[in-house]
Image (tube, rainbow, N blue to C red):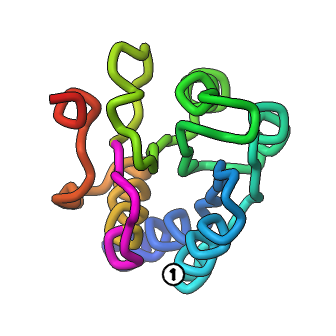
Amino acid sequence: MSAQVMRRRLEDTAMNQRVLIVEDEFLIALDIAETIEEMGLTVAGFASGRDHALALAPHADIAFVDVNLSDGATGPSIGRELAERFGITVVFMTANPEQLEGQDVRPLGVLTKPVMPHILQDTVAYAIANRVGSIAAMPQQLRTLTAANR
């Protein structure tokens, strides 16, 4: 198989990634969705709490998850379940990264709100590369959980 065909398959796989937005602030969720859609990706849905997030999980590949949601500080447990049960790549987006301290979660990383669109785009590209086995530089603003807890 030629390198060009392999590259096209990788690009097709990358562009087929669906993004779940778990955020209880509607305007923030819409901003995230706009950035995702401008990249040519599909938003799998919006969830403001645990039950809806888990219902949408089978339709997602990547999830941006806030910590504090409409049903409380359920983001860490939702993120863990999305990753473990559904194989979703999870990125936390929160104004309170310290709330993730001591949590048994293994996200791709943590973004501290507010997040500029270009940072979100870089993070999505990194998440896609991570999922499809490609190489991409980790965005400087994306922190691993260990680094986010220092």
* Residue 96, placed above or below residue 4: above
Q: Give the x, y percent position of residue 59.
A: 76, 49
Q: Residue furthest bottom?
A: 38
Image position of 93 (left or right of 146): right
Residue in the image at 57% along x and 48% along y: 63
How crowded is the residue under tag 1: few (<14 C-alpha within 10 Å), some, or many (20+)? few
* Residue 85, placed above or below residue 64: above
On whether residue 66 falls in the magenta region, the answer is: no
Q: Is residue 40 visible?
A: yes
Q: Give the x, y percent position of residue 57.
A: 74, 40
Image position of 62 (left or right of 18): left
Image position of 73 (left or right of 133): right
Quadrant housing the N terminus: bottom left
Residue in the image at 64% along x and 55% along y: 21
Counting every numbered tag in the picture gives 1
Q: Is residue 1 visible?
A: no
Image position of 64 (left or right of 105): right
* Residue 129, placed above or below residue 52: below
Q: Give the x, y percent position of residue 47.
A: 76, 49
Depth check, front residue: 71 or 60: 71
Depth check, front residue: 17 or 117: 117
| Residue type highlighted by circle 1 | Met
* Residue 123, placed above or below residue 109: below
Residue in the image at 40% along x and 54% along y: 127
Residue range (magenta): 110-119
Looking at the rendered structure, the secondary structure element under dot 1 is loop
The residue that label 1 is drawn on is: 39
Residue in the image at 66% along x and 40% along y: 69
